[in-house]
Amino acid sequence: MADFDQIDEEGEDEEWALEEQLLKYSRDPVVVRGSSHVTVFGLSNKFESEFPSSLTVKVAPEEFKASINRVNSCLKKNLPVNVRWLLCGCLCCCCTLGCSMWPVICLSKRTRRSIEKLLEWENNRLYHKLCLHWRLSKRKCEMNNMMEYVILIEFLPKTPIFRPD
């Protein structure tokens, strides 16, 4: 007698094996680091606009530079306000028992989210069509144990349109 409550996982195993095979051949992501001396909660106020050589065949240098300039203009607009609130929060920290730091934390989170939305817009507009995915990621600094935000450019595997059965 057939068990109708049992879920057939036969197709899922094949899909998982296909994804694993595609990921095995994907390249390491490109890391775009912050290039300035001002950093607020790990978020630098400017990212490097130098074109990485590993993206040469994937995207035009002009498009890369335009995307980085959009991110940098968002940071240029938001981070000076964050720095002012950070200074005010540090001055009043003892009197407010640390509560004066909340505006800085909220503004920093808002800046991160606006950059993530901008990168998602860039992905949908151009980069997903080129099998690339840009995202903001937290990484450990090379020189010390602190964390910093970097832009990761990941290579998406090409999925076959036609699979012979």
Image (tube, rainbow, N blue to C red):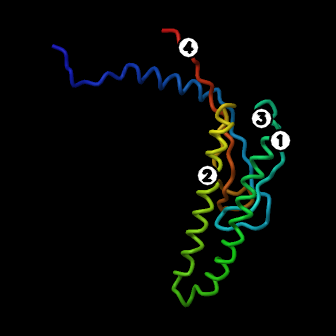
Quadrant where the N terminus sits is: top left
Instruction: Report the residue marked by disc 2.
Output: 116
State the separation of the CA atoms marked 2 and 4: 33 Å
Residue at 83% x, 39% y: name it: 61
Task: Where is residue 74? Give x, y as percent.
Answer: 70, 59
Residue at 65% x, 60% y: name it: 147
Residue at 81% x, 50% y: name it: 49
Tell me the quarter of the picture where residue 120 sits.
top right
Instruction: Report the residue marked by disc 1.
Output: 62
Residue at 65% x, 50% y: name it: 118
Q: Which mark is residue 162?
A: 4
Instruction: Report the residue marked by disc 3.
Output: 59
Q: In this orientation, which residue lies closer to the viewer: 18 or 130? A: 130
Disc 3, SS: loop
Disc 4, SS: loop
Tell me the quarter of the picture where residue 131 sits.
top right
Task: Where is residue 96? Give x, y as percent.
Answer: 52, 87
Counting residues from the N terminus, which is met first, the one under dot 3 or under dot 4?
Answer: 3
Disc 2, SS: helix
